[in-house]
Amino acid sequence: MELLKQRILTDGVVLPGGILRVDSFLNHQMDIDLINEIGKEFKRLFGNEKVDKIFTIEASGIGIACIVAQYFKVPVVFAKKAKSKNLIGDVYSAEVKSFTKGNSNTIMVCKDYIKKGENILVIDDFLAKGNALIGLTNILKQAQANIVGCGICVEKAFQNGGETVRNMGIRVESLAKIKSMSDDSLVFED
Amino acid sequence: MELLKQRILTDGVVLPGGILRVDSFLNHQMDIDLINEIGKEFKRLFGNEKVDKIFTIEASGIGIACIVAQYFKVPVVFAKKAKSKNLIGDVYSAEVKSFTKGNSNTIMVCKDYIKKGENILVIDDFLAKGNALIGLTNILKQAQANIVGCGICVEKAFQNGGETVRNMGIRVESLAKIKSMSDDSLVFED
């Protein structure tokens, strides 16, 4: 998606350790117009599929998922990272290690909200080592839901998470796929 | 807002300890059509004010804020709960105690994204004891931004957070204001 790639080149910041900061427009401050264009692009890519729900993980995936969901006219369900008093009853859970935060979380979803046979499109802002995505697809398998595919805004292809998930037979569409990244260059895959 | 009140009566679940679970439509599974109606209602309430940005807190506020922001045609900024490697540089921070999770968090926002003199509308899903809202307004005061007001989906008026924030001279508009709540009854304020 050319618009997103250009925005990454203009406003993205590469930090030491393979970190790309896009928080001026995607995951801290959020440019809602850009995210609507992202929604249209995911609709173009997955528009021929039956999608019953959009599934994502807190926190930064939620806003993007909600905007995207408008183009599919379906609800959003987001996996939670910590068990709160409000989340009671049977849950599906999976372990997820965070690359950027350096810790590990149990993510969970109330069993009422992902049902057997539902067609689920997973949406997230970033795909690096694939831990979040593997956790989410793990939950969908537990629920016996159908994984339509994964729509990712920014994939850091050099960290191999996308390869891992695609090798599981899951369709992954990334709007900006970064081949390599250093202090003074950022190269997208074609 | 009648639509939201009716939905709470139909699908909300009251749990022991003054907890209202609305996670089938508002903050775990999210009914995007309903949240669009919420966006229209906040636009009706705050439409005469100059709003430069919508400000919220992760996690469940983000999706609602993003949908609401479309009606104001402005970006969203969300306060983060944990410092990640991606959040570098100068930040504003405040302490927030969570009623539902029973813990305390430092919330923070990159100084680049809330600027002096900006007109900020705060959006959140819940207002109970007001801790999140007080933390967010604390950050806005540090930034010397103008607080247009706070738009809340569900206020538990019996927990007095709304009174506390209103007594600070801040406009708070809640779409469903709960006067009292028990296992077998839920009463809204007029």
Image: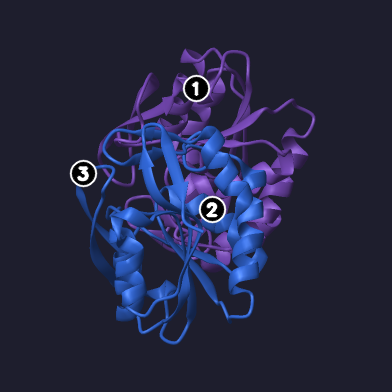
Chain colours: A blue, B purple
Chain letter, disc 1 residue: B
Q: Is residue B118 left or right of residue B22?
A: right
Q: Point out the image quarter for the N terminus of chain A.
A: bottom right
Residue A77 location in percent, x, y? 46, 64
Q: Which mark is residue B112?
A: 1
Residue under disc 2 on the same chain as residue under disc 3:
yes
Q: Classify 10 Å Cα crowding around label 3: few (below 14), some (14-19), many (20 and above).
A: few
Amino acid type at circle 1 is Asp
In front: B177, or A27?
A27
Residue A61, percent from left and from top:
45, 53
Q: Which mark is residue A64?
A: 2
Q: Mark 2 — on which chain does it sit?
A: A
Please report contact status of discs 2 and 3: CB closer than 8 Å, yes or no: no
Above or below, B144 relative to B106: above
Q: Quadrant of residue A184?
A: top left
Q: Residue at x 48, y 36 (%)?
A: A12
Residue drawn where x is 77% and y is 34% of the image: B47
Q: Nearer the viewer, residue B52 or A30?
A: A30
The tag on residue A102 is 3
Residue A12 visible (yes or no): yes
Q: Confirm whether residue B177 shows in the render.
A: no
Q: Nearer the viewer, residue A63 or B138?
A: A63
Which secondary structure lies at badge 1?
helix
Q: In the rendering, which numbered label is found on residue B169? A: none
The three-letter amino acid code for the residue at tag 3 is: Gly
Q: Is residue B169 above or below residue B87?
A: above
